[in-house]
Amino acid sequence: MALLDPQSHAKTEQTHVNEELFVTPYKEMTVEDVMSSLRGNFPTATNFTSFQSSSSARHSVARLEQPRAQFCVGDALNVLVEMRDYRGQPKAYGGDFILARIHSPKLQASASGDVTDFRNGSYRVRFTLFWPGEVQVSVLLIHPSEAVQVLWRTGKQNYNKTEYSGNFVNGSKTEKATCGLRLNTDKPLCEYKDAEEGEYFACVQPPTLPCSFLNTMSSYNTPGPTIAEDETQLLARKDVGVQIQNNFTTVQVISCSGFFLSEDQINSCLMGKRLHLKGDSTVRQWIDYLERKLKDLKYKGRIESYLSELAVDAHRNITVQWKNHGHPWITHHSNDVNKCVYISRYLDTLDLGGDGQDIVVIGIGQHFRAFPLEFFIHRLLNIRRAILRLQARSPQTQVFIKLENTREFSSMILRLSDWYGHMQNLAQRKVFGDLKVGLVDAWDMSVATNTFAVHPNDIVVSNEVAVVLSHLCHHP
Protein backbone atom coordinates (compact mmCIF):
# COMPACT_ATOMS: atom_id res chain seq x y z
CA MET A 1 0.00 0.00 0.00
CA ALA A 2 1.64 3.18 -1.10
CA LEU A 3 1.21 5.92 1.48
CA LEU A 4 -0.69 8.75 -0.18
CA ASP A 5 -0.84 12.34 0.88
CA PRO A 6 -4.31 12.87 2.37
CA GLN A 7 -5.03 15.44 -0.33
CA SER A 8 -3.65 13.42 -3.24
CA HIS A 9 -5.86 10.82 -4.92
CA ALA A 10 -4.69 10.90 -8.52
CA LYS A 11 -3.72 7.83 -10.49
CA THR A 12 -0.88 7.89 -12.94
CA GLU A 13 -1.56 9.32 -16.38
CA GLN A 14 -0.78 5.94 -17.94
CA THR A 15 -3.49 4.24 -15.89
CA HIS A 16 -6.03 6.80 -17.11
CA VAL A 17 -5.00 6.11 -20.71
CA ASN A 18 -5.41 2.36 -20.19
CA GLU A 19 -8.89 2.83 -18.74
CA GLU A 20 -9.98 5.08 -21.61
CA LEU A 21 -8.92 2.47 -24.17
CA PHE A 22 -10.36 -0.45 -22.24
CA VAL A 23 -13.95 -1.48 -22.90
CA THR A 24 -14.86 -4.50 -20.80
CA PRO A 25 -17.31 -7.16 -21.99
CA TYR A 26 -17.70 -8.17 -18.34
CA LYS A 27 -20.47 -6.98 -16.06
CA GLU A 28 -19.50 -4.35 -13.53
CA MET A 29 -20.17 -5.57 -9.99
CA THR A 30 -20.90 -3.67 -6.81
CA VAL A 31 -20.47 -4.73 -3.21
CA GLU A 32 -24.25 -4.97 -2.94
CA ASP A 33 -24.40 -7.25 -6.00
CA VAL A 34 -22.02 -9.69 -4.36
CA MET A 35 -23.66 -9.46 -0.95
CA SER A 36 -27.06 -10.15 -2.54
CA SER A 37 -25.70 -13.26 -4.26
CA LEU A 38 -24.44 -14.56 -0.90
CA ARG A 39 -27.58 -13.89 1.15
CA GLY A 40 -28.68 -17.51 0.95
CA ASN A 41 -25.54 -18.36 2.94
CA PHE A 42 -26.15 -15.81 5.69
CA PRO A 43 -27.49 -17.26 8.95
CA THR A 44 -31.18 -16.93 9.68
CA ALA A 45 -32.01 -15.51 13.08
CA THR A 46 -33.52 -18.00 15.53
CA ASN A 47 -34.48 -17.76 19.18
CA PHE A 48 -31.39 -18.90 21.07
CA THR A 49 -32.57 -20.04 24.50
CA SER A 50 -29.60 -21.88 26.03
CA PHE A 51 -26.36 -23.67 25.26
CA GLN A 52 -28.14 -27.00 25.80
CA SER A 53 -30.43 -26.25 22.86
CA SER A 54 -27.52 -25.74 20.44
CA SER A 55 -26.24 -28.34 17.96
CA SER A 56 -24.05 -31.05 19.46
CA ALA A 57 -21.71 -33.12 17.31
CA ARG A 58 -21.52 -35.79 20.01
CA HIS A 59 -25.29 -36.31 20.00
CA SER A 60 -25.74 -36.09 16.22
CA VAL A 61 -25.30 -38.90 13.72
CA ALA A 62 -24.20 -39.41 10.10
CA ARG A 63 -25.56 -42.33 8.07
CA LEU A 64 -25.33 -43.53 4.49
CA GLU A 65 -28.31 -42.46 2.39
CA GLN A 66 -28.24 -45.66 0.34
CA PRO A 67 -26.12 -48.29 2.10
CA ARG A 68 -24.46 -50.88 -0.15
CA ALA A 69 -21.90 -53.61 0.35
CA GLN A 70 -19.66 -52.05 -2.29
CA PHE A 71 -19.41 -48.89 -4.33
CA CYS A 72 -17.64 -48.28 -7.63
CA VAL A 73 -14.94 -45.74 -8.40
CA GLY A 74 -16.72 -42.69 -9.77
CA ASP A 75 -19.91 -43.28 -7.80
CA ALA A 76 -21.48 -40.59 -5.67
CA LEU A 77 -21.55 -41.36 -1.96
CA ASN A 78 -24.30 -39.51 -0.08
CA VAL A 79 -24.15 -39.18 3.68
CA LEU A 80 -27.12 -37.83 5.63
CA VAL A 81 -26.44 -35.90 8.83
CA GLU A 82 -29.15 -35.66 11.48
CA MET A 83 -28.33 -32.88 13.91
CA ARG A 84 -29.37 -33.03 17.56
CA ASP A 85 -28.89 -30.69 20.50
CA TYR A 86 -27.14 -31.42 23.82
CA ARG A 87 -30.34 -32.92 25.19
CA GLY A 88 -30.44 -35.38 22.28
CA GLN A 89 -33.45 -33.66 20.72
CA PRO A 90 -33.60 -33.30 16.90
CA LYS A 91 -32.85 -29.81 15.61
CA ALA A 92 -35.65 -28.15 13.64
CA TYR A 93 -33.52 -25.63 11.73
CA GLY A 94 -30.22 -25.57 9.86
CA GLY A 95 -27.30 -23.19 9.53
CA ASP A 96 -24.62 -25.39 11.11
CA PHE A 97 -21.12 -25.00 9.63
CA ILE A 98 -20.01 -28.49 8.58
CA LEU A 99 -16.86 -29.64 6.79
CA ALA A 100 -16.51 -33.23 5.57
CA ARG A 101 -14.03 -35.48 3.80
CA ILE A 102 -13.41 -39.05 2.70
CA HIS A 103 -9.94 -40.51 3.14
CA SER A 104 -7.90 -43.68 2.88
CA PRO A 105 -4.86 -43.36 5.18
CA LYS A 106 -3.00 -46.29 3.63
CA LEU A 107 -3.22 -44.69 0.17
CA GLN A 108 -2.76 -41.14 1.50
CA ALA A 109 -5.82 -40.27 -0.57
CA SER A 110 -8.54 -37.82 0.42
CA ALA A 111 -11.31 -35.62 -1.01
CA SER A 112 -13.75 -33.12 0.45
CA GLY A 113 -17.54 -33.29 0.31
CA ASP A 114 -20.25 -30.83 -0.75
CA VAL A 115 -22.75 -30.03 2.01
CA THR A 116 -26.43 -29.29 1.31
CA ASP A 117 -28.40 -27.71 4.16
CA PHE A 118 -32.07 -28.71 4.14
CA ARG A 119 -32.76 -26.00 6.76
CA ASN A 120 -34.61 -28.47 9.00
CA GLY A 121 -31.74 -29.86 11.05
CA SER A 122 -30.63 -32.38 8.43
CA TYR A 123 -27.89 -32.23 5.81
CA ARG A 124 -26.67 -34.21 2.83
CA VAL A 125 -22.94 -34.50 2.19
CA ARG A 126 -22.06 -35.63 -1.32
CA PHE A 127 -18.71 -37.22 -2.11
CA THR A 128 -17.26 -38.53 -5.37
CA LEU A 129 -15.37 -41.80 -4.93
CA PHE A 130 -12.14 -41.28 -6.83
CA TRP A 131 -10.12 -44.37 -5.82
CA PRO A 132 -10.64 -48.03 -4.91
CA GLY A 133 -10.19 -49.58 -1.49
CA GLU A 134 -11.40 -48.95 2.04
CA VAL A 135 -12.68 -45.40 2.44
CA GLN A 136 -13.38 -43.64 5.73
CA VAL A 137 -15.92 -40.83 6.12
CA SER A 138 -15.32 -37.93 8.49
CA VAL A 139 -17.91 -35.20 9.11
CA LEU A 140 -16.89 -32.32 11.41
CA LEU A 141 -19.17 -29.81 13.07
CA ILE A 142 -16.99 -26.71 13.01
CA HIS A 143 -19.62 -24.39 14.52
CA PRO A 144 -23.25 -24.97 15.49
CA SER A 145 -25.77 -22.69 13.83
CA GLU A 146 -26.11 -20.74 17.06
CA ALA A 147 -22.37 -19.93 17.02
CA VAL A 148 -22.57 -18.95 13.34
CA GLN A 149 -25.22 -16.39 14.28
CA VAL A 150 -22.84 -14.93 16.89
CA LEU A 151 -20.02 -14.76 14.33
CA TRP A 152 -22.30 -13.08 11.81
CA ARG A 153 -23.70 -10.57 14.31
CA THR A 154 -20.31 -9.59 15.72
CA GLY A 155 -18.71 -9.46 12.27
CA LYS A 156 -21.16 -7.10 10.59
CA GLN A 157 -19.84 -3.54 10.44
CA ASN A 158 -17.31 -4.33 13.17
CA TYR A 159 -13.96 -2.85 12.14
CA ASN A 160 -12.48 -2.69 15.61
CA LYS A 161 -11.61 -6.31 16.48
CA THR A 162 -8.13 -5.49 15.23
CA GLU A 163 -6.55 -2.04 15.39
CA TYR A 164 -3.11 -0.66 14.62
CA SER A 165 -0.37 1.33 16.27
CA GLY A 166 1.15 3.84 13.89
CA ASN A 167 4.68 5.20 14.19
CA PHE A 168 5.24 8.73 12.90
CA VAL A 169 8.95 9.35 12.42
CA ASN A 170 11.02 12.47 11.76
CA GLY A 171 14.72 11.81 12.24
CA SER A 172 15.23 10.68 15.82
CA LYS A 173 11.75 11.80 16.86
CA THR A 174 8.95 9.20 16.98
CA GLU A 175 5.31 9.67 17.96
CA LYS A 176 2.70 6.91 18.20
CA ALA A 177 -1.01 7.02 17.38
CA THR A 178 -3.94 4.63 17.04
CA CYS A 179 -4.81 3.67 13.46
CA GLY A 180 -7.56 1.62 11.88
CA LEU A 181 -9.82 1.01 8.91
CA ARG A 182 -12.59 2.87 10.74
CA LEU A 183 -11.93 4.81 13.95
CA ASN A 184 -14.72 5.68 16.37
CA THR A 185 -13.31 8.85 17.88
CA ASP A 186 -13.90 12.60 17.99
CA LYS A 187 -10.16 13.29 17.87
CA PRO A 188 -8.66 14.90 14.73
CA LEU A 189 -7.66 12.28 12.16
CA CYS A 190 -5.00 11.77 9.55
CA GLU A 191 -6.97 10.20 6.70
CA TYR A 192 -5.21 8.16 4.01
CA LYS A 193 -7.45 7.79 1.01
CA ASP A 194 -7.34 6.39 -2.48
CA ALA A 195 -10.45 8.03 -3.84
CA GLU A 196 -10.65 6.16 -7.14
CA GLU A 197 -10.25 2.73 -5.52
CA GLY A 198 -12.31 3.69 -2.46
CA GLU A 199 -9.58 2.44 -0.10
CA TYR A 200 -9.25 4.19 3.25
CA PHE A 201 -7.64 4.04 6.65
CA ALA A 202 -6.95 6.67 9.27
CA CYS A 203 -4.81 7.44 12.28
CA VAL A 204 -5.41 9.76 15.19
CA GLN A 205 -3.28 12.84 14.56
CA PRO A 206 0.00 12.59 16.49
CA PRO A 207 0.82 15.37 18.96
CA THR A 208 3.19 17.38 16.74
CA LEU A 209 4.31 15.50 13.62
CA PRO A 210 2.45 15.91 10.31
CA CYS A 211 0.25 13.13 8.86
CA SER A 212 2.73 12.54 6.02
CA PHE A 213 5.33 11.27 8.52
CA LEU A 214 3.50 7.97 9.11
CA ASN A 215 6.22 5.34 8.71
CA THR A 216 5.18 1.92 10.05
CA MET A 217 2.15 0.22 11.56
CA SER A 218 1.74 -2.93 13.65
CA SER A 219 -1.52 -4.61 14.62
CA TYR A 220 -2.97 -5.56 17.98
CA ASN A 221 -6.20 -7.22 19.06
CA THR A 222 -8.76 -5.18 20.97
CA PRO A 223 -10.88 -6.82 23.72
CA GLY A 224 -13.38 -7.47 20.94
CA PRO A 225 -17.15 -7.51 21.04
CA THR A 226 -19.03 -8.36 24.22
CA ILE A 227 -21.07 -11.55 24.04
CA ALA A 228 -23.27 -13.38 26.53
CA GLU A 229 -21.94 -16.22 28.72
CA ASP A 230 -23.93 -18.87 26.81
CA GLU A 231 -22.55 -17.49 23.55
CA THR A 232 -19.01 -17.75 24.91
CA GLN A 233 -19.70 -21.45 25.55
CA LEU A 234 -20.73 -21.86 21.92
CA LEU A 235 -17.26 -20.76 20.79
CA ALA A 236 -15.25 -22.82 23.26
CA ARG A 237 -12.29 -24.59 21.65
CA LYS A 238 -13.44 -28.05 22.80
CA ASP A 239 -16.60 -27.70 20.72
CA VAL A 240 -14.92 -26.50 17.50
CA GLY A 241 -14.27 -29.13 14.83
CA VAL A 242 -15.81 -32.10 16.66
CA GLN A 243 -16.47 -35.23 14.61
CA ILE A 244 -20.07 -36.33 14.19
CA GLN A 245 -20.41 -40.04 14.84
CA ASN A 246 -21.14 -42.40 11.92
CA ASN A 247 -23.61 -45.23 12.24
CA PHE A 248 -21.47 -47.16 9.73
CA THR A 249 -17.81 -48.14 9.66
CA THR A 250 -15.97 -47.84 6.34
CA VAL A 251 -17.07 -47.84 2.70
CA GLN A 252 -15.70 -50.46 0.31
CA VAL A 253 -14.89 -49.12 -3.17
CA ILE A 254 -13.90 -51.35 -6.06
CA SER A 255 -12.70 -51.23 -9.58
CA CYS A 256 -5.80 -40.57 -7.39
CA SER A 257 -5.09 -38.58 -5.26
CA GLY A 258 -3.74 -35.10 -6.10
CA PHE A 259 -0.89 -33.99 -8.33
CA PHE A 260 2.71 -35.03 -7.68
CA LEU A 261 5.13 -33.63 -10.20
CA SER A 262 8.81 -34.42 -10.51
CA GLU A 263 11.57 -31.82 -10.37
CA ASP A 264 12.19 -32.24 -14.11
CA GLN A 265 8.51 -31.68 -14.90
CA ILE A 266 8.37 -28.50 -12.81
CA ASN A 267 11.63 -27.16 -14.29
CA SER A 268 10.42 -27.88 -17.82
CA CYS A 269 7.08 -26.18 -17.16
CA LEU A 270 8.56 -23.06 -15.56
CA MET A 271 11.48 -22.58 -17.95
CA GLY A 272 11.68 -18.93 -18.99
CA LYS A 273 8.69 -17.95 -16.87
CA ARG A 274 8.24 -15.14 -14.40
CA LEU A 275 5.96 -16.08 -11.53
CA HIS A 276 4.47 -13.10 -9.68
CA LEU A 277 2.98 -14.12 -6.31
CA LYS A 278 0.92 -11.40 -4.65
CA GLY A 279 -0.88 -11.70 -1.34
CA ASP A 280 -0.41 -13.12 2.12
CA SER A 281 2.05 -15.61 3.61
CA THR A 282 0.01 -18.62 2.43
CA VAL A 283 0.97 -17.81 -1.16
CA ARG A 284 4.48 -16.87 -0.03
CA GLN A 285 4.82 -20.55 0.94
CA TRP A 286 5.08 -21.30 -2.78
CA ILE A 287 8.57 -19.77 -2.86
CA ASP A 288 9.64 -21.96 0.06
CA TYR A 289 8.22 -25.08 -1.58
CA LEU A 290 9.72 -24.43 -5.03
CA GLU A 291 13.12 -23.53 -3.55
CA ARG A 292 13.19 -26.87 -1.70
CA LYS A 293 11.84 -28.80 -4.69
CA LEU A 294 14.11 -27.32 -7.39
CA LYS A 295 17.80 -27.53 -6.57
CA ASP A 296 18.78 -24.83 -9.12
CA LEU A 297 16.20 -22.29 -7.92
CA LYS A 298 18.20 -20.09 -5.55
CA TYR A 299 16.52 -18.08 -2.84
CA LYS A 300 17.76 -14.47 -2.99
CA GLY A 301 16.29 -13.46 0.34
CA ARG A 302 13.95 -10.78 1.49
CA ILE A 303 13.60 -7.46 -0.23
CA GLU A 304 12.07 -4.44 1.57
CA SER A 305 12.14 -6.08 5.01
CA TYR A 306 9.73 -9.05 4.99
CA LEU A 307 7.39 -7.52 2.37
CA SER A 308 8.94 -9.11 -0.71
CA GLU A 309 10.98 -12.21 -1.51
CA LEU A 310 12.74 -13.47 -4.63
CA ALA A 311 14.07 -16.78 -5.98
CA VAL A 312 15.90 -17.23 -9.32
CA ASP A 313 17.10 -20.06 -11.55
CA ALA A 314 19.54 -18.18 -13.79
CA HIS A 315 20.22 -21.21 -16.00
CA ARG A 316 16.55 -21.75 -16.91
CA ASN A 317 15.62 -18.07 -16.65
CA ILE A 318 12.99 -18.72 -13.97
CA THR A 319 12.07 -16.01 -11.48
CA VAL A 320 9.61 -16.34 -8.61
CA GLN A 321 8.78 -13.20 -6.66
CA TRP A 322 6.36 -12.70 -3.79
CA LYS A 323 5.04 -9.34 -2.58
CA ASN A 324 2.58 -8.80 0.24
CA HIS A 325 -0.84 -7.25 -0.25
CA GLY A 326 -1.79 -3.82 1.04
CA HIS A 327 -3.30 -2.90 4.41
CA PRO A 328 -4.80 -4.58 6.44
CA TRP A 329 -1.81 -6.72 7.37
CA ILE A 330 -2.21 -8.34 10.79
CA THR A 331 1.19 -8.72 12.40
CA HIS A 332 3.03 -7.69 15.53
CA HIS A 333 5.95 -6.69 13.28
CA SER A 334 6.28 -3.07 12.23
CA ASN A 335 4.96 -2.90 8.69
CA ASP A 336 6.39 -0.19 6.42
CA VAL A 337 3.25 1.47 5.02
CA ASN A 338 5.16 3.15 2.21
CA LYS A 339 6.12 -0.23 0.76
CA CYS A 340 2.74 -1.99 1.09
CA VAL A 341 0.98 -1.60 -2.25
CA TYR A 342 -2.65 -2.49 -2.90
CA ILE A 343 -2.87 -5.42 -5.32
CA SER A 344 -4.89 -3.38 -7.81
CA ARG A 345 -2.13 -0.74 -7.92
CA TYR A 346 0.55 -3.41 -8.17
CA LEU A 347 -1.16 -5.02 -11.16
CA ASP A 348 -1.52 -1.64 -12.88
CA THR A 349 2.23 -1.03 -12.62
CA LEU A 350 3.42 -4.61 -13.16
CA ASP A 351 6.24 -4.66 -15.70
CA LEU A 352 5.34 -7.48 -18.10
CA GLY A 353 7.66 -8.89 -20.70
CA GLY A 354 4.99 -9.11 -23.40
CA ASP A 355 6.20 -12.60 -24.34
CA GLY A 356 3.49 -14.60 -22.60
CA GLN A 357 5.88 -15.81 -19.91
CA ASP A 358 4.29 -13.94 -16.98
CA ILE A 359 2.05 -15.71 -14.49
CA VAL A 360 0.24 -13.85 -11.71
CA VAL A 361 -1.03 -15.65 -8.59
CA ILE A 362 -3.15 -13.73 -6.07
CA GLY A 363 -3.95 -15.11 -2.63
CA ILE A 364 -5.62 -13.02 0.07
CA GLY A 365 -8.15 -13.45 2.82
CA GLN A 366 -6.56 -14.43 6.14
CA HIS A 367 -5.84 -10.84 7.17
CA PHE A 368 -9.38 -9.74 6.29
CA ARG A 369 -11.31 -12.18 8.48
CA ALA A 370 -11.46 -9.77 11.43
CA PHE A 371 -13.29 -7.17 9.34
CA PRO A 372 -16.78 -6.99 7.78
CA LEU A 373 -17.43 -9.05 4.65
CA GLU A 374 -18.36 -5.93 2.69
CA PHE A 375 -14.85 -4.56 3.20
CA PHE A 376 -13.29 -7.72 1.75
CA ILE A 377 -15.68 -7.67 -1.21
CA HIS A 378 -14.76 -4.07 -1.94
CA ARG A 379 -11.09 -5.07 -2.09
CA LEU A 380 -11.92 -8.02 -4.37
CA LEU A 381 -13.81 -5.80 -6.79
CA ASN A 382 -10.82 -3.47 -7.07
CA ILE A 383 -8.65 -6.50 -7.87
CA ARG A 384 -11.23 -7.72 -10.41
CA ARG A 385 -11.09 -4.42 -12.29
CA ALA A 386 -7.28 -4.41 -12.17
CA ILE A 387 -7.17 -7.96 -13.59
CA LEU A 388 -9.36 -6.85 -16.49
CA ARG A 389 -7.06 -3.89 -17.13
CA LEU A 390 -4.02 -6.19 -17.02
CA GLN A 391 -5.60 -8.67 -19.42
CA ALA A 392 -6.54 -5.85 -21.78
CA ARG A 393 -2.94 -4.72 -22.13
CA SER A 394 -1.38 -8.20 -21.86
CA PRO A 395 -3.86 -10.92 -22.95
CA GLN A 396 -1.19 -13.63 -22.76
CA THR A 397 -0.56 -13.13 -19.04
CA GLN A 398 -2.22 -15.91 -17.06
CA VAL A 399 -3.86 -15.08 -13.74
CA PHE A 400 -4.72 -17.46 -10.91
CA ILE A 401 -6.67 -16.85 -7.73
CA LYS A 402 -5.61 -18.95 -4.73
CA LEU A 403 -8.63 -19.34 -2.47
CA GLU A 404 -8.26 -19.31 1.30
CA ASN A 405 -7.25 -22.41 3.21
CA THR A 406 -8.50 -23.42 6.64
CA ARG A 407 -6.59 -22.54 9.79
CA GLU A 408 -6.08 -23.78 13.37
CA PHE A 409 -9.14 -24.43 15.53
CA SER A 410 -7.21 -22.67 18.28
CA SER A 411 -7.36 -19.39 16.35
CA MET A 412 -9.31 -16.57 18.00
CA ILE A 413 -12.79 -17.58 16.87
CA LEU A 414 -14.47 -14.17 16.97
CA ARG A 415 -11.76 -12.76 14.69
CA LEU A 416 -10.46 -15.63 12.59
CA SER A 417 -13.05 -18.41 12.43
CA ASP A 418 -13.02 -20.59 9.32
CA TRP A 419 -16.67 -19.62 8.85
CA TYR A 420 -15.41 -16.15 7.94
CA GLY A 421 -12.95 -17.78 5.53
CA HIS A 422 -15.77 -19.87 4.04
CA MET A 423 -17.87 -16.75 3.36
CA GLN A 424 -14.85 -14.95 1.89
CA ASN A 425 -14.22 -17.87 -0.46
CA LEU A 426 -17.84 -17.76 -1.63
CA ALA A 427 -17.32 -14.05 -2.33
CA GLN A 428 -14.14 -14.76 -4.34
CA ARG A 429 -15.97 -17.35 -6.46
CA LYS A 430 -18.66 -14.79 -7.22
CA VAL A 431 -16.29 -11.92 -7.99
CA PHE A 432 -13.83 -13.87 -10.15
CA GLY A 433 -16.05 -16.69 -11.42
CA ASP A 434 -16.82 -15.17 -14.81
CA LEU A 435 -13.27 -13.97 -15.56
CA LYS A 436 -10.58 -15.71 -17.54
CA VAL A 437 -8.66 -16.76 -14.43
CA GLY A 438 -7.80 -20.09 -12.83
CA LEU A 439 -9.03 -20.88 -9.33
CA VAL A 440 -6.74 -22.80 -6.98
CA ASP A 441 -9.08 -24.38 -4.45
CA ALA A 442 -6.85 -24.39 -1.38
CA TRP A 443 -9.94 -24.71 0.80
CA ASP A 444 -10.88 -28.02 -0.80
CA MET A 445 -7.30 -29.29 -0.49
CA SER A 446 -6.90 -28.35 3.18
CA VAL A 447 -10.30 -29.80 4.13
CA ALA A 448 -9.61 -33.00 2.17
CA THR A 449 -6.26 -33.53 3.92
CA ASN A 450 -7.67 -32.51 7.33
CA THR A 451 -5.07 -29.73 7.47
CA PHE A 452 -6.31 -27.03 9.81
CA ALA A 453 -3.24 -24.77 9.76
CA VAL A 454 -2.93 -21.21 8.53
CA HIS A 455 0.29 -22.32 6.82
CA PRO A 456 -0.56 -25.76 5.37
CA ASN A 457 1.95 -28.57 5.00
CA ASP A 458 3.84 -29.43 1.81
CA ILE A 459 1.14 -31.85 0.66
CA VAL A 460 -1.35 -29.00 0.34
CA VAL A 461 1.17 -26.49 -1.05
CA SER A 462 2.46 -28.98 -3.64
CA ASN A 463 -1.10 -29.56 -4.84
CA GLU A 464 -1.72 -25.81 -5.06
CA VAL A 465 1.39 -25.33 -7.19
CA ALA A 466 0.60 -28.39 -9.31
CA VAL A 467 -2.87 -27.06 -10.19
CA VAL A 468 -1.25 -23.96 -11.69
CA LEU A 469 1.40 -26.03 -13.48
CA SER A 470 -1.27 -28.33 -14.89
CA HIS A 471 -2.94 -25.29 -16.46
CA LEU A 472 0.33 -23.90 -17.74
CA CYS A 473 1.84 -27.08 -19.11
CA HIS A 474 -1.14 -29.45 -19.46
CA HIS A 475 0.12 -32.02 -16.98
CA PRO A 476 -2.49 -34.71 -16.30
Image (spheres, helix red, strand yellow):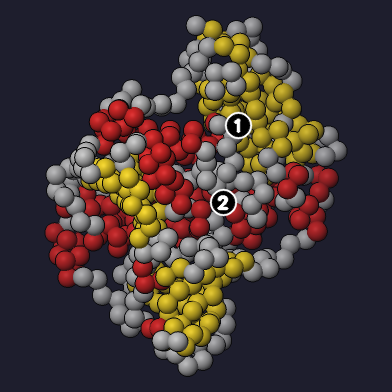
Residue at 65% across, 12% down: 67
Give the numbered dot on residue 91. none
Q: Which residue is mark 2?
A: 420
Q: CA distance from mark 1 to mark 2?
A: 17 Å
Horizontal side of 23 relative to 295 (left or right) equals left
- The first of marks 1 and 2 along the sequence is 1
Q: As rendered, which of 126 and 166 lies closer to the eye?
A: 166
Image quarter where the C terminus lies is top left
Q: Residue at x 42, y 44 (%)?
A: 288
Question: In percent of the image, x 23 and y 44: which residue is there?
Answer: 314
Give the residue at the far bottom of this rendering.
Answer: 208
Measured as percent of width and height from the top left, residue 280 is found at: 44, 54
Mark 2: secondary structure: helix
Q: Residue 363 appears at what percent x and percent y?
A: 41, 49
Query: Residue at the spot x=41%, y=26% of the render?
Result: 260
Tell me the residue that label 1 is attached to.
Answer: 100
Q: Relative to 179, does residue 461 appear above or below in the rendering?
A: above
The image shows residue 140 at horizontal and vertical percentages of 66, 35
* Residue 410 visible from this viewpoint: yes
Question: Which amino acid lies under the numbered mark 2 shown in the image of this protein?
Answer: Tyr
